[in-house]
Structure formats: C-alpha cells, structure tokens
Amino acid sequence: MIKINDRIRNIIARDKKVMFTTSREHFPFVVDHASGDFAYDVAGNRFIDFSSFIGVYTLGDNANEEIRQAVKGQVDKLMHPAFLDFFSETPVRFAEKLVTMFPKGFGRVFFSNSGAESIEDAIKLTRIFTRRPYLLSFYNSFHGRTLGALGLTASKAIQRKYIGPGPNVIHAPYPYPYRCPFNTSSEDECADACIDFVESNIFAKETSPDEIAAIFMEPVQGEGGYIVPPKRFVQKLRKLASDNGILLVDDEIQAGYMRTGKFLALDNFGVEADIYTMSKALGAGVPIGATVARRALGDSKPGEHAGTFGGNLLAIAAAEASLDYVKRNMKSLQGAVRTKGEFVMDRLHEMMSDYDIIGDVRGIGLMIGMELVRDRRSKVPAVAERAKIVDECFRNGLLLLPAGISTIRIIPPITMEMDNIEKGMDVLENAIKKSDKKR
C-alpha cells in the first residue's frame, strides 16, 4: 500500500497556491524519477506505469539509455539552432529518416514543440493549400488546447468554456459502436449513418463541401474515450474527402508511434491521410511535434509560417535516437505490442464476464480502453466508481489515467515486461472487484 507522507502533502499544497489548476487532481502522485516499467514518487513509492506519462514514454519511462545519451551528447554542442531561420543538418537528417515511415509521396515536414502545435500547423497548411475556410471534425475528438486545436476538439464542454469563437469548425458524429449516436444495431450501420449524416446534413444544409479545407480525425479517439471506429467508416471517410477535394488530416499524436503495433495507427484501417500530425512519443520525453504532408500538396511561402523553437536540437536528438531504435527493432516491437495487447484484452474480457461494472472493452495493440457503467442495460456511465477504481489502483502501486466520461485507458510502455503487465492487471482487477455491485 502506497504511503502519502508530509512531503507529498506539502508539495501539493504549494502547487495549489502558485500553479493554475490543470488535471493534477486525480490522485496525489508527486513524481521524482522513473525508469523502464516504473515511476517513483518523492516518498520512494514505486508504481507500475500503465499511463506512459500520458502516452509519451512508449519505449519505457524516462526513455532508454540510448536516447538519454543522445540528448546528453547534444547539450554541450548546441541546444537551440533557430532552425526556422537558420539551416541545420541535424533536423534535416531526422526529417529524412522520419518521412521513410510514412506512405510514398510524403516529403514535407514542419517541426514544432507539441501535439497542439502540430495541429495548429496542419490547420494553417490545409487553408494555405486549399484556400478554403472551413474545417470538419468529430464529437468526442481531442486535438489540443490551443485556440485553433481547441476549435476542433469536442470532448468535454469545460475544455472550451469561455474560449470561443475559434476557427470555422463543423462537428459531426463519430461512430462510437458502444454508444452509436444513431442507435444502430451493428458497427457497419453506425459507420454508414455517420457518413450519411455528413453528406445529407452538413454538406447539404450547412456548408458546401467545396468550402471545407480538411477533415481532422483521430484513428482511435484518445481523451474522448479510446473509441475505435469501424474500418468501414474510415475507408468511407477517405473516399468522401477525396471525392470532394477535401484534405484528410490524421491526428497520430496519441495513437501513433507503435502504440497500436504500427508506426501509423491509420495503417490499421488500410487508408492514407494527406497530412499527419505526431507528438507525444515522438520525442521520447522531450517536447516535439511534427506535421508531415504529401509533397504534391506544395510548400508554404517564405514568411507564411514559421516559429522560434521548432527543430530544437535536444528534441531532435531524442527523436532521432528513438526512431533509430524503433527502426532497428521494428519486428520485435510489433510482436511485443501484439502479444501484450492480446493478453490485456483477454484478461479484460475475462473480467467483463465476472464484473457487471465493465460495459465495454476496446482497443488496438496497447491502446486499450475499459468503459465502466452502473449497469449494462442502461449503460449509465460509472463516473464516481471509475474515480474510486483509479484511486484504489494508485494506492496499490498502479498508475492509470481516465478518458471519456467513464473509461479507463491502459497504455503501458510497449517495452514493459509481461510480468509487470500481469501484476498491474491483478491490481486493476482487485480494484474493480471492490467497486462492482454484484460483488
């Protein structure tokens, strides 16, 4: 059992006096250091990390030795190259390597500092390329918290309250098979209904498709609830965009970089986007964002788009070392994600047969969501129960994060040892057992 000591309480009290409130309210975790499968707080408590520090540490907490050495080696040479004003070989070399991970024909890269910035860059580029004013996004989506990215986001009202107006964004229903907005009886029917809504309502009654610059989507919705769309929906959306000259922007910020077993999560659906955005795991713990576009779309003009810190050499050093590691170990990483993901899903389905509080289990690879309900017939979200389960897990040495209204996300580092995944699942099941009404 985790011990909360006076030092932890003191740091949290000091935080609340000087820092703006964000999302640090789930449990009293005051991190000190981390390594591999584990995170440690300032009291010396050890936690199995099923959060990857919000999807950042895909290759292990605090990255690995190879990545850390790359960053250390860059520090004494040069940290800030003003890359968007001066030339530098290191970011160019990394961009050349990065585009090899994308479909043929991708060859334009813009580096930024975060996932939200990579989305902002995509917003600007789609408008530059198309000269169209509107954007289309989806309910339950989360694309960031800066103004443009927040305009695309439609996950929780509190995230947008008092902030608007943002960019010209229209939101459409996203196929959420467990809670299809059209109450259909199958995933494919839900997919068809969502596409039909765009065509028969948005295109016909709200905005002509020839005024829409881009459709932004997450291949698996992240903060909105770890919602996996039917393959049929993604493929029909790609066709809808192509038929109307609309660019498809794929937000890989949380789902990408091997999380689903593929470098690009969209590859699970058999389609390609026109622009991809990536961050989180890309820098292995050092902030970086990347926006990658088809070369055929063209280029921006001098002065049309730039920044200060994009291409920071510490971030590039970490990202390049991380990518080199991934490319060398691609087959073993893919196998690990598949094996570990199947284990977690099998275990969750076993729990689902025993505990009524589990309404749905879904995911791809090691991007897995477990949605909790007060009862399966009504599907009323078990919000309070989720909070108790997450807290109970924390107090027994397991870090978890919520998503959506009542979903728990399971995103350990893909390099986590199977023994520790098993131990983490044991902690989770014990917490669920305490909260399940049937027990």
Image (cartoon, helix red, strand yellow):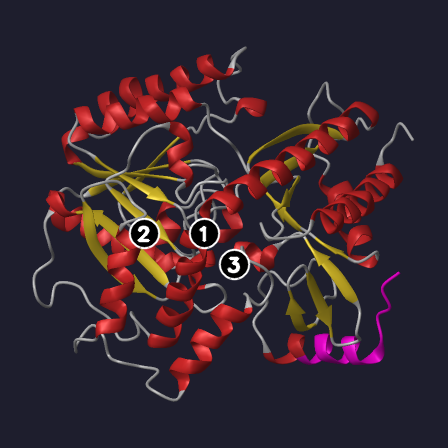
The residue labelled by disc 1 is 160
User: Residue visible at 19% across and 28% down?
Assistant: 242
| Marks 1,3: beta carbons within 8 A | no
| Marks 2,3: beta carbons within 8 A | no
User: Residue visible at 47% across and 46% down?
Assistant: 258
Give the mark, 2 or 3, whose residue is nearer the N terminus.
3
Quarter of the image that includes the C terminus = top right
Q: Is residue 156 visible?
A: no
- 298 relative position to 179: left or right: left
In the figure, 346 relative to 434: above or below?
above
Viewer-nearest of discs 1 and 3: 3
The residue labelled by disc 2 is 166
Give the mark, 1 or 3, whose residue is nearer the N terminus.
3
The residue labelled by disc 3 is 56
Mark 1: amino acid: Arg
Kindly report the secondary structure that dominates the magenta region of the rendered protein.
Answer: helix
User: Residue visible at 28% across and 17% down?
Assistant: 200
Residue 419 within the segment the image draws in magenta: no
- Structural crowding at the residue carrying mark 2, measured as other residues with C-alpha within 10 Å and reported as few (<14), some (14–19) or many (≥20): some
Q: For the residues marked 2 and 1, what is the alpha-carbon distance in whole angstroms?
A: 9 Å
Of helix, strand and loop, which one carries label 1?
Answer: loop
Q: Position of residue 79 (x, y in %)?
A: 35, 82
Q: For the residues marked 2 and 3, what is the alpha-carbon distance in whole angstroms?
A: 28 Å
| Marks 2,1: beta carbons within 8 A | yes
Mark 2: amino acid: Gly
- The magenta-colored residue range is 1-14
- 202 relative position to 376: left or right: left
Q: Position of residue 133 (x, y in %)?
A: 18, 43
